[in-house]
Image (cartoon, helix red, strand yellow):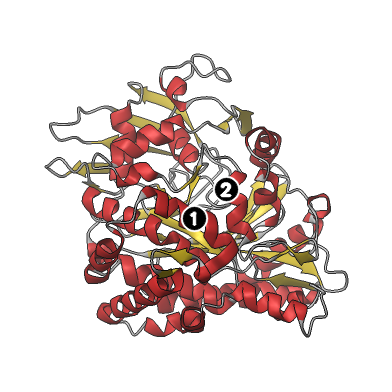
Amino acid sequence: MALVSQAGPAYCVRSEIIRSTNGRNGLTNNIEASRMKESSVSFSSSSYYSTKKSQILNLDGAGVGIQRGYRTIVAASPPTENAVIDTEPLTKEDLVKYLASGCKPKEKWRIGTEHEKFGFEFGTLRPMKYEQIAELLNSIAERFDWEKIMEHDNIIGLKQGQQSISLEPGGQFELSGAPLETLHQTCAEVNSHLYQVKAVAEEMGIGFLGIGFQPKWGIKDIPVMPKGRYEIMKNYMPKVGTLGLDMMFRTCTVQVNLDFSSEGDMIRKFRAGLALQPIATALFANSPFTEGKPNGYLSMRSQIWTDTDNNRAGMLPFVFDDSFGFEQYVDYALDVPMYFVYRKKKYIDCSGMSFRDFLVGKLPCLPGELPTLNDWENHLTTIFPEVRLKRYLEMRGADGGPWRRLCALPAFWVGILYDEVSLQNVLDITADWTAEERQMLRNKVPKTGLKTPFRDGLLRHVAQDVLKLAKDGLERRGYKESGFLNAVDDVVRTGVTPAEKLLEMYHGKWAQSVDPVFEELLY
C-alpha cells in the first residue's frame, strides 16, 4: 500500500496506511496487518523525502485487518512485529512522515469514540475478577458474534468489524469504537454496546458503573489483568510518580479521536484542544470519591494525571510555539521514555530507555536491534498528554460517565474542531491565553471545576461561549446533532458539575455512603 506525497512543505500525504483506535488511555497497540500472510508498506516520496524502505510484515496470527475503503482498521490485540526487514534503518524523517500520513480531506474525517467503565458484583459491589471478565467476554463473543482476542491462553478482548473491546489494567471494560461519520452513529454504537454487555452481565450478577474513578475500593482490592505490558507498567510507575498505579487500576475515561486535513489543520486543532481541555474536564467532572469518602476533587481522575509520569503527560506548551508541527512532536515523543518492545510474542521490558537510542541500534534491552514502524506506533500509544497526536488527534481530558455524556463528549469536540467557523472563534478566544494561564486551569479545574477563577470572571463564563460555538458548529454540519449537547446544558448554565451533584446526594439522601452511586450511575 503506497503513500503518495503531496507537494509543499506541510508534510501531509494521502494515506492508505493502516489505522486503529487505541486503548488504556491509549495503550492498546495498533497493528499493521491484512488478511494476507505478508504485506508490504512502502513510502513514496516527494523531493523532500528519499525513497526509504519497504517492510515485510509477518502477522504470526496476532491480528486481522478489515479493509474498508481507503484504509484498514485493526482491532485491539497483542502487537505484531516485523519478522523480515528489507530496508534501510528508520530515520526521524520517516517518523515525521508517519504522523503526516494521517492527513485526509474533510469528506474522509471520522469520529472515533472510546469509553471505559467499571464492572462490579451486584451483591458485594466488589470489582469483577478476571475469571468473571473472561466468562463475560466469552459469552458476548458467542451471543453477539464477536471474535476473541487472546494473549497466550487468556482472552483479553473482542473485535467485531471496526469495533474492539479491551481490558484495562484493573479490569476496566473499554469499547474502542469504529470511525463513524455522524454523532447519531456514534451514540447508536454506544447504545448497542451497552445493551450487549448488560444483557450478558445481568445474568451473571454483574453491573457496570459510569464514573471517572473507582469510588469504593482500594488498589489492593482491584484484580490485575493477565496482560504482559501491564506488568511492566506496574513496576515502572512508582519510579516516576506517586499516582501511576491509581491511573492504571482505578480510573475510567471517555475520549474522542478526530482527523485533520493538513499539518496546519492539525496544529490549529491541537492548540484549540489543549486550551479547552480544562473546560472539557470540568464539564464532565465525575470522580469525587475515593475509598468511600469525598476526596476533595471533582475530577480525581484528572488530578491523578498530574503526578503519574510527567515525562509523558501534561499540557505540552511547545504546541503553541511558532515552530510546532509534526517534526516537533516527533522530537518530543523520541524523548518520552519507553515502556516495552514486543518481540517473539513477548513484552521486553525497556522501561525508561530512549527511542532515540533504539533508532541507532543502541537500546540496552535489545542491543544492535533497530525499530520498525510498529515499534514507533506502539511507543506513541504510551504517551499520555491532555491531547495526543498519532495519525489523528485524541481529546483525553474527560471522566467516564453515564451514557448520555458518552455521546455528549464527542459532540462537544466535533462541534468545535470539525467546523471551521467555530474552530477559528475558539482560536481567537484563546489566542492571548498564556502558558501559565493554561497550566493554572489544568491544575485548578480538577478541584474547582467551572467555578475556577479566570481573568475577570469564572471559567463557567468561557464555557458558556464555547458550548454555544460547539452547538453552532454542529448545526452547520447539517446532521441535526446539537441535541447531543443537552446532557451538559445544565452544567454550563448553573456551573454545577456532575461531581458536585454526586457530592450533594452523598451529603444528603445517601447519608454519607457511596454505595448508592453504584445504582445512580449504573448503565
Residue displayed at 25% across by 79% down:
476
Where's residue 366, x and y in %?
55, 19
Placement of 307 over or under 256, stated as above or below = above
Taking depth in this image into account, of 65 and 21 the one nearest to the observer is 21
From this viewpoint, which residue is outermost toward the right? 124
**SS under mark 2:** helix
Amino acid on which the number 2 mark rests in the picture:
Thr
- Marks 1 & 2, CB-CB < 8 Å contact: yes
Read off the residue under disc 1: 442
Badge 1 density bin: few <14, some 14–19, many ≥20, Cα 10 Å: many
Checking the image for residue 306, the label placed there is 2
Q: Quadrant of residue 273?
A: bottom left
**SS under mark 1:** helix
Q: Quadrant of the N terminus?
A: top left
Placement of 399 over or under 369, stated as above or below = below
Placement of 180 over or under 80, stated as above or below = below
Report whether residue 135 is seen. yes
Where's residue 393, x and y in %?
38, 54
Amino acid on which the number 1 mark rests in the picture:
Arg
Residue displayed at 35% across by 21% down:
89
Residue displayed at 54% across by 37% down:
60
Where's residue 421, x and y in %?
22, 70
Report whether residue 522 is seen. no
- Give how far apart the Cα atoms at labels 1 and 2 are: 9 Å
Badge 2 density bin: few <14, some 14–19, many ≥20, Cα 10 Å: some
